[in-house]
Amino acid sequence: MPLALYDTWSRTLRPFTPLRPDHVGLYCCGPTVYDHAHIGNLRTYVFEDVLRRALALNGYTVRHVVNITDVGHLVSDADDGEDKMEKGSRRTGESAWAIAERYTVAFQHDWRALNLLEPTLWCRATDHIAEQIEFIADLERNGYTYRTADGIYFDTARQDDYGYLARLDIAGLQAGKRVALGDKQRATDFALWKFSPPGSTRQMEWQSPWGVGFPGWHIECSAMSAKYLGPLFDIHCGGEDHIAVHHSNEIAQTQARHGTRLANFWLHGHFLMLDAGKMAKSGGDFVRLQTLIERGVDPLAYRYLCLGAHYRSSLRFTMEALDGAQAALGRLRKAYRQWPEGGAPDAEAVARFKAEVDQDLNLPRALAVLWEVVRSDLPAATRRATVDCFDQVLGLRLADWHEDVVTIPAAIALLAEQRDAARAAKNWREADRLREQLQAEGWQVEDSAKGQVLRPLD
Ligand code: AMP
Ligand code: ZN
């Protein structure tokens, strides 16, 4: 059965065939590097990594491009407010360039901790200013732009099908006009080039045919994807929040310059939610992968958690669910370690696993096949070889895992942290109570010069 993917453009599950035999061009919108990524952002990259692995499982060579947004993403999607990079600079006192560098490195660190395959190419918006200017100049030549006091804008009224991806109700949007228009002619019009504010110098600004300034956020993806994948490529991905504005605008620009809708398939990952609502970078209150790691969580347990929910359903994040994922991963690793090498995969199990993956990346069902194999009475060496095949898609690095790495459940790490705080406050009674609680949970605490060390009780 061929791979079928749910395409947001057509709102249908479509059999996947590449535009060029055996090769797939895949573009994924990357991070805006004014702050750390939160685990919600990372959920989207895990989904994209599984997609890439599923394409490889189907024999395709994937050219995977991920951009780094290091300029132009404004605080508000309505094209006003500060640039997120310059705002980050004010917050931390570092230059916008230093911030971009620091958070790019931190992001790529998270990327590797989750065992995401390295993209064929990372590309930064600030390394492609000339390409973006050329793109805008072509849009201007084709009559799709107008000038206001603060920039060059895309005229969405020129396209009858503007917003089709999101099924936007343009008439309703115009009538409502809840969005601050500024000098824009329509709520849906968007900035291609913004002028540096008069009388002030931005840290990130460039000369252009229209004046000194910086590119709008959407143009970088249209310009860089055209450069590296061509004006029509196979699959474009991102989180569901990108459908209504960012991706609709990428399509509008590319349509106006190249006459294509950019990608043959549009895939969107649904959000990771906290109890309080969606997890957003701008909300200030977000969970980082590094914070979880410091609490003793294995980053691959977070990956496992993501695999347990279909990418097109939202996932509510709780520490309990993460602990459950970590425990399941622990059981899987223990089982795997007992199996000898040298077997051959069970063809029937591999086919069933692949059928689930091929059905719009149904990883929850693929995991169910995995557990059936783990618990089956197939010879141990066969189970190992079969699970090795599965792990090419799951990316849990089962073959690399060694038992001596002790993983501490998040709830235990939290108790230890509270005990640390109690000791720092010289609240010895509370510290002793927490030590006893940890013991009751099966963990021994030893106080050393470097702080407390946790060991599982035998
Ligand atoms: P950003 O760095 O904000 O540009 O976002 C990077 C990626 O994370 C984009 O594909 C977003 O759509 C996605 N994203 C943002 N918030 C979440 C969330 N809570 N859950 C899943 N994906 C998200
Ligand atoms: Zn993009």
Image (tube, rainbow, N blue to C red):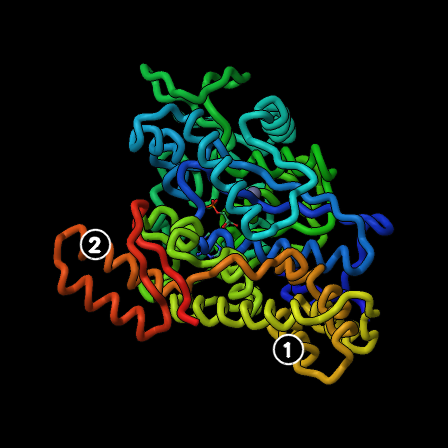
In terms of depth relative to the viewer, which is nearer, 310 or 195?
310
Q: Residue at x 65, y 27 (%)?
A: 138
Q: Report the side of 376 relative to 297 (left or right).
A: right
Q: How many marks?
A: 2
Callout 1 secondary element: helix
**Residue 240 makes an appearance in the image:** no
Quadrant hosting residue 355: bottom right
Answer above or below: position of 271 versus 108. below
Whether disc 1's CB lies below 8 Å from ligand 1 is answered no
- The residue at which mark 1 appears reads as 371
| Residue 154 on image: x %, y % | 53, 36
Location of the N terminus (image quadrant): bottom right
- The residue at which mark 2 appears reads as 421
Tell whether label 1 touches label 2 (CB within 8 Å): no
Q: Identify which amino acid the numbered label 1 is placed on.
A: Trp
Q: Residues within 10 Å of mark 1 (few under 14, many from 20)?
A: few
Q: Residue furthest bottom?
A: 377
Lower sequence index among marks 2 and 1: 1
Q: Which mark is residue 95?
A: none
Answer above or below: position of 343 versus 31. below
Q: Residue at x 46, y 72 (%)?
A: 324
Q: Residue at x 47, y 61 (%)?
A: 407
| Residue 130 on image: x %, y % | 61, 22
**Residue 250 makes an appearance in the image:** yes
Q: Identify which amino acid the numbered label 2 is placed on.
A: Ala
Answer above or below: position of 72 versus 338. above
